[in-house]
Image (cartoon, helix red, strand yellow):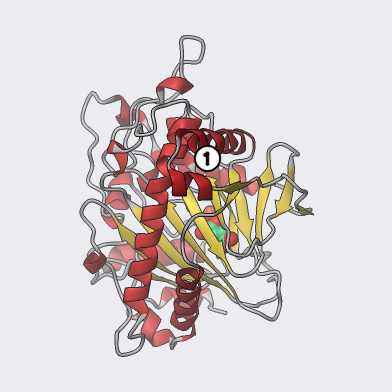
Amino acid sequence: MLSVEKISSWPIGRNNERFLRLVLRLRGGLLQLPDSIQERRKVNNLSDTTEPGNDSSQFDALAKEQQLRQESSEWDTSKPEEAQEGDIPVIDLQEYFQTGSDAALDKVAGELRTACEETGFLSIIGHGVAQSEIDEAFAQTEAFHASHLDVKQQILMDRPDWPVGGMGYLPLKNRKLPARDTGNVNEAFIIKIDDKLTMDSNQWPAPAELPTFRQAVENYANAMENLGKRMLPVYARALDMPGDFFEEAFIKPLYRLRMTHYPAVPRDPENAFGISPHVDTSFFTILAQNQPGLTIFSERRKVWINAPLIPGAFIVNTGELLKQWTNDRFLSTRHFANNNNSSISRYSIPFFFNANPHYKMTCVPSCCSADNPAKYQPISYAESQGVVQGE
Ligand SMILES: O=C(O)CCC(=O)C(=O)O
Ligand SMILES: [Fe+2]
């Protein structure tokens, strides 16, 4: 396991002063994140679209993150229970995807509405992504993490000589994504795409080491983007809106694909989590997992429940972006993960799907009224969740 000394020897600052500050904060067990919104925007490659007089300038993303972080430290996660039937609804998309019929759309939209209002998590089957493509993504995730540490360190996330932050290799016991006092006992490879960032903007491992990696990751990311877009009419109809309601916002969506390894280690004395309790900042997240290990909070039963593994299914959860867009109608549910199996590595591949970073979200009309006014001013992902990146 990596010590703070080891971490502090990495060249993660953009200049000496900033680097020193980071090391000092690390040693103090504080956030490993830039101080100001401006620095966070730079690291996350987001332009500052906040204009004087724009109401969204009043949204304080760092304050929101700190609030979420504070709340998460108060959650009692000590007694998770096994999930009961119906805790995480299973939605079959096959008929709608195959026929495209209005009746099939209405049926899945009704199921999705209930799931998003009551649970915030669901499983999808009949999604059309070939099992061979999912298996290949896991094989590549495993191969990447099995490669020598030097291969991974060459593409270290936020290294000073790579222009865009938040992509590449995130080491074990990282205190980022989400930022917490105890490091997250996972390592990850992350790509990020948006209206300006392409596959070439990302950091890739040397082809000599992993020759088929990049193509397989691109294929899987494209399959997820395609699936995400095909699901948008279901979300629109679930909110009593026309099927194409979200289309314009997702012409150039921002997404992140994260290939995570949870090593087989005993729960550590600091009580660190595989990934600490958090909510996602996404519109929605599509998660594939090879072993159980995800635990979510059931708002209905007010208990933490262990999510079962359904072979071939994806778990989908609403993030903060969609929660805010729907005036808090759709839940963004807290969750964490551990590797509960002490002898086998766990791998998971979440795909975080967001709108175009600069698309202004105005409260979905069916979610606000004179009696239920909009709680949030029109705001874009870049101005709000993009700075937080808490997933
Ligand atoms: O690995 C998992 O099951 C969940 C991962 C997760 O919550 C995340 O990366 O945001
Ligand atoms: Fe998450």
Residue drawn 68% across the image and 71% down it: 268
The quarter of the displayed image where residue 258 is located: bottom left
Where is residue 340 shown, x and y percent of the image?
70, 69
- Label 1 neighbourhood size at 10 Å, few (<14), some (14-19), many (20+)? few
The quarter holding residue 231 reads top left
Identify which amino acid the numbered label 1 is placed on: Gln
Label 1, secondary structure: give it: helix
What residue lies at 39% left-to-right and 36% top-to-bottom?
A: 60
Q: Which residue is mark 1?
A: 67
227 in relation to 263, above or below? above
Query: Considering the image in quadrants, where does the N terminus appear?
Result: bottom right
The count of marks equals 1
Q: Quadrant of residue 202?
A: bottom left
Residue 224 in the image, given as x and y percentages of width and height: 41, 58
Horizontal side of 126 relative to 365 (left or right) equals right
Ligand 2 within 8 Å of disc 1? The answer is: no
Q: Is residue 267 left or right of residue 280?
A: right
- Residue drawn at x 64%, y 35% is 118
Q: Is residue 92 left or right of residue 86?
A: left
In the image, residue 377 sits, relative to residue 233, either above or below, namely above
Q: Is residue 147 visible?
A: yes
The residue furthest top is 370
Which of 168/310 is in front?
310
Horizontal and vertical percent position of residue 371: 51, 10
Relative image position of residue 249 (x, y in whole percent): 30, 38
Ligand 1, seen in the image, is in the quarter at: bottom right
Q: Is residue 117 left or right of residue 242?
A: right
Instruction: Give the residue at x 47% y 66%.
Output: 130
Does the rendering let one see residue 155?
Answer: no
Q: Is residue 342 above or below residue 221?
A: below
